[in-house]
Amino acid sequence: MNVFHKTLLASTLASLTLASVQAAETAQNNKPDVKTDINIDSERGNTMQSQQASDSAVILYGKLNITAQYNDENGDTKNTIQSNESRLGVKGGYQITDSLEAFYTIEYKVDTSSDSSDNFTARNQFVGLRGNLGSLAVGRNDTIFKRSEGKVDQFNDLDGDIKYLFKGQNRMAQTATYLTPDMNGFRIGATYVADAEANQYGENGYSIAAFYGDKTLKKTMFYASVAYDDNVKGYEILRATAQMKIMKLKLGAMYQQQEETYDAAGTVSGSRENGYLLSAAYPVNDFTLKAQYQDMEDVGQSWAAGVDYKLAKPTKLMAFWIDRTYDTAYTGSSEETDKYFAVGIEHKF
């Protein structure tokens, strides 16, 4: 059994033990049930569950996203059956007092298409406290900058993900993230990245963001955020995101300005690049039609179109086409074009 399997198994057993202890304490003290919100952020999908405290210690969750694809990467063509950020995790919380809760998540990427059976890779893994003053989480986590994108990226975790042209989609190993309580739909967050993190090259990094609205567009018809990265993974980045729902149509937009400020060799005199993204999604019965365009100065452009078909709440079929071109300024030689056509299935649990 490899180290990833051992770690995940140990974490699950520890969580189950915690659940047993908590249930025993609840029965002994005969306390009334306490409602608790578990809001654990994971790559491209936040979940919130309200349940009895005695049942909140362990939640096993995950998803499998598998596609059959035809990939043409700068003339090199191949057929693949590939995994797209499939994952398995354990999360939960413990109600310490009526106003203070501990929460955690331990999540792994599962690459079903890997040639090796050792196919677990660390994703978000953190522990924290949540109360009237907000939440604080420490460990391996998405930066608050990355989380500010909301749901504007219609091809998240696929080959059309915004990370291929935009910097800032960072999950860092040594972070502390604070998020304020909800203030009438408005929240502010900040992430500190320690200089000991390997990708920080000895520099401390900071990420801040302000949010307004519901990023799922279920509670509000509008979502907006402004975020800034300072020396995170060698970049200084400004990002503004907005998404709105008009009737059933979801429209999204993002503006980003990025500049490389340092690398392993020291200070970098990089150019400041500007880019933007436009996205749309429209449901027709059980189908959802999606389209997206992305452009980053001196990096490249990307077109994407697709359709999802909902079989059940946790299960969908999908098909998509992606065309991405990298500029000569980015490749250092000639222009390069990548094309992807795929059909697949996703199931969440």
Image: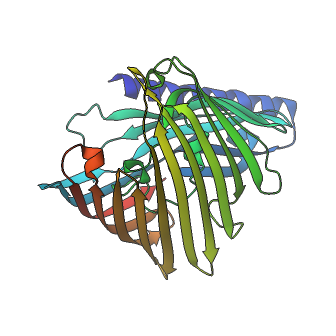
Residue lying at 56% horizontally and 72% vertically, measured from the top left: 250
Q: Is residue 306 above or below residue 285?
A: above
Q: Is residue 136 above or below residue 245?
A: above
Residue 57 shows up from this direction: no
- Residue 339, given in percent of the width and then of the height, sits at 23, 61
Residue lying at 42% horizontally and 61% vertically, measured from the top left: 294
Q: Is residue 74 left or right of residue 284?
A: left
Which of 191 and 285 lies nearest the eye of the viewer?
A: 191
Q: Is residue 129 left or right of residue 236?
A: right
Q: How many marks?
A: 0
Which of 294 and 285 lies nearest the eye of the viewer?
A: 294
Q: Is residue 192 left or right of residue 219?
A: left
* Position of the N terminus by quadrant: top left
- Residue 241, given in percent of the width and then of the height, sits at 59, 57
- Residue 141, given in percent of the width and then of the height, sits at 55, 34
Which of 278 and 108 lies nearest the eye of the viewer?
A: 278
Residue lying at 44% horizontally and 25% vertically, measured from the top left: 199
- Residue 303, given in percent of the width and then of the height, sits at 35, 66
Q: Quadrant of residue 109?
A: top left
Residue 109 shows up from this direction: yes
Q: How is the image coloured?
A: rainbow
